[in-house]
Amino acid sequence: MIKLGRQRENRIWCTFWSLAFFHFEWLMPDNSEITRFTAQLQSSSLPKAPAAKNLRIKIFADGANKETMLRYYQEPFIAGFTTNPTLMRKVGIASYEEFANDILSIIRDRPISFEVFSDDFEEMEKQAHTIASWGKNAYVKIPITNTSCAPSVSLVERLSAAGIKVNVTAMTIYEQVEQVAPVLAKGCGGIVSVFAGRIADAGYDPVPIMKRSVEYLRKYPNVELLWASPREVYNLVQADMIGCHIITVTEDILKKLPLLGGQLNQVSLDTVRMFYNDAQAAGYKIRYVESIEK
């Protein structure tokens, strides 16, 4: 009976968040500040994107490749690092603990987020305390729910009260921020990671949610909003414009940062040169015809 009760409670939570997302996205008044802001972002009269050095937002490098992480550690504009089990598995890391301790032994002065990987909250709590013990700059990523959609808010509250720096991850709706920010703030503070890129992948504009979250967090100065899973360089500009505190950036996007704020006619020319050079390098040939039959 207890198991059935928990399943029913989890379904209620999922239904609540789904309805909240629907209500916010589709019933928001047209004259709201958020809608006007979104329209401004989409306007062709926007000012030129600021150069990377002028961005106020903190950039965290996202990945699990040691060589890449240490290379970006040499860059002063990288303010921190994030990783997760999926990224670790992708690069073939065999020992979670060995990798984390190795990185933390070198990078000691910037935050690094490591994620728990249990689906049981009691086990998550043990993992969180262990991860936090690995280094003073270690943040513990706790998913907003487990795989059954049971909320992790109570766990986050206990961890934050214990002085563990928590990065609440995998959020996609404003109501989740509203649920977890107060318990983080009541403790030692932390990070709320909203996956703006995944919101966009689902066909929704993430900016209204991110903008509203920024405004909500003004009353919790020890809680920072992280724009997670960006898909393009312009996401940095969007995040910076709304006052988001942090953005995680993969190496693919970091490589494009020199383009930020560049002249569009130069971007056009560079694209033409890329196509030409690649065709030459491939040795492509076309056999010309004498004439075109009409």
Image (cartoon, rainbow, N blue to C red):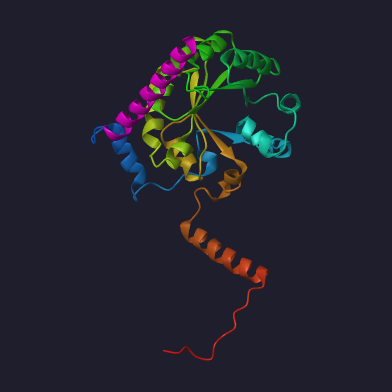
Is 133 left, or right, of 142 in this rendering? right
Is 59 left, or right, of 207 in this rendering? right
Of residues 270 and 121, the one drawn nearer to the viewer in this rendering: 121
Residue 11 shown in magenta:
yes
The image quadrant that residue 134 belongs to is top right
Can the viewer see residue 217 in this picture?
no
Residue 226 shown in magenta:
no
Of residues 274 and 283, the one drawn nearer to the viewer in this rendering: 283
Residue occupying image coordinates x 59% and y 40% = 250
Of residues 46 and 131, the one drawn nearer to the viewer in this rendering: 131
Residue occupying image coordinates x 47% and y 23% = 149
Give the x, y percent position of residue 212.
37, 28
Give the x, y percent position of residue 279.
62, 69
Residue occupying image coordinates x 36% and y 22% = 16
Q: Which residues are magenta?
A: 1-27
Give the x, y percent position of residue 171.
47, 28
